[in-house]
Amino acid sequence: MTGIGIIGSGAIASVHVDSYKRYASDCQVKAVCDTFKAKADDLIANKALNAKAYDDYKRLLSDPAVDAVSVCLPPSAHAQISIDALKAGKHVIVEKPMASSLEECDLMIEASRDSGKILAVVSQNRYKTPVAKLKKMLDQGAVGKVLYASFDSLWWRGQVYYDLWWRGTWAQESGGCFMSHAVHYIDLMHYLFGMPAAVKASIHNVGHDNSECEDLGFADFDYKDKVIHFTCSLVSHGERQSIIVEGEKGTLSVPWAVSANKALPNGFPEEDGAGKKALEETYRAIPDLASEGHDAQLGNFLKAIRGEEPIALDGRAGKKTIELIMGIYKSAVTGKPVEFPLKPGDSFYCKESMIALMPRFHEKKKSVDNFSSSTITLGRDLGR
């Protein structure tokens, strides 16, 4: 039985607790920590947990009943607390984004290696059936050579969203919509296509005057043999989340859609009914995932702790997403394409040197410790 500690008791912590409770025969939440101890007490009471409440994470890490921790805190706290947990002999799964900088990612990976404990990074959208099926079809070459793809990570947040003390600051949130919202979809891009050669990007703030950071951004990733366009927004009322892959034999999309054309004698298109049917049949033949989202990823974490399967998304994979975001920010600041990899010594490798170069779109003038409600919505799902 794996003892779980939850560090941070905000809204995403509830998601972790619910997932762990689905594996009640394998694990039990033994401790919850929050600097506002009343929030930890409330989470324990609301979820009917037989757990201790702490207001100091180091006391939680010294609890012998805790074997592994979920780090559910603002981004600026991820690295140090994950490192301390690993050094204390605890397995760690950390919410997105993994860390505030590539330097912090490397320190976390080093702590995992030295301790022999697992470091996992949350990216629950890898565990969605439409994404898993798209991955399988791309690996099989179902659409032939991929020519172009586009990712839309479009969200909407009201002005008050940025009143929370850590949001909308380069020091605490570590970025705007690319870091805090598009991080999952940037991970999916890496998952589906690997690392690009270079990126050209721009960032803007068009609708949130209590944030230093971007609420709108665009990036073009150069893969040499294809181009991937990425749009990220916090001003999109429809909150569309989509992936569109254009290949030689057809177009595949998440949410699921398929189209295929063939050329008329003059080069104009007509629908390729047979090609479209073949793609549809390939998609339907791939089994749905037995478990999705946080449930699936935390299930993998628990199995990896028991040695039953490898961890699916470790610190090295999580670092790739941070590297892509740092490349976006560097390109936006310099106005030039940025090549990968970004190495130690680069101004965008360390947090302090990155922050010094980033624009302050607005001065953050309003700050509150807590909202009256911790309810969150998770946007539009990657649908069927």
Image (cartoon, grey):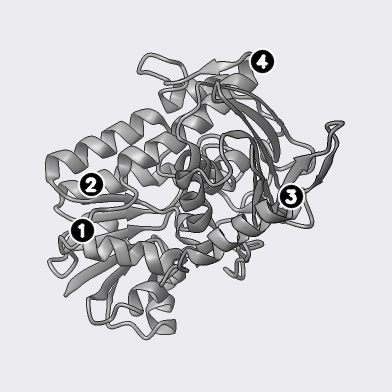
73 or 153: which is nearer to us? 153
Residue 235 on image: x %, y %? 77, 48
- Whether pointer 2 and pointer 3 mark residues with C-beta atoms closer than 8 Å, the reply is no
CA distance for labels 2 and 1: 8 Å
Residue 20: x, y in percent? 34, 73
Q: Residue under circle 4?
A: 335
* Distance CA(mark 3)–CA(mark 1): 59 Å
The residue pinned by badge 3 equals 272
**Quadrant location of residue 90?**
bottom left
**Where is residue 46 drawn, in percent x and y?**
44, 83
Indicate which label's residue lies in the foreground, 4 or 1: 4
Which mark is nearer the camera, 3 or 4?
3
On the rendered structure, is 68 left or right of 89? right
- Quadrant containing the C terminus is bottom right
**Residue that mark 1 sits on:** 61
Of labels 2 and 3, earlier in sequence is 2
Indicate the quadrant containing the N terminus: top left, top right, bottom left or bottom right: bottom left
Location of residue 311 in the rendering, given as x and y in whole percent from the top left corner: 27, 53
First along the sequence among labels 2 and 1: 1
Element class at badge 1: helix
Residue depth check, mark 4 versus mark 2: number of the one nearer the observer:
4
Question: What kind of residue is marked 1?
Answer: Leu
Is residue 61 at least partly visible in the picture? Answer: yes
Distance of label 3 from label 4 (alpha carbons): 42 Å
| Placement of 233 over or under 331, stated as above or below | below
Residue type, mark 2 in image: Asp
Of helix, strand and loop, which one carries label 2? helix
Report which residue position mark 2 lands on. Answer: 84
Label 4 to label 2, Cα distance in Å? 38 Å
* Viewer-side residue, 227 vs 120: 227
Residue located 45% across and 45% down the image: 139
Residue 176 visible in rendering: no
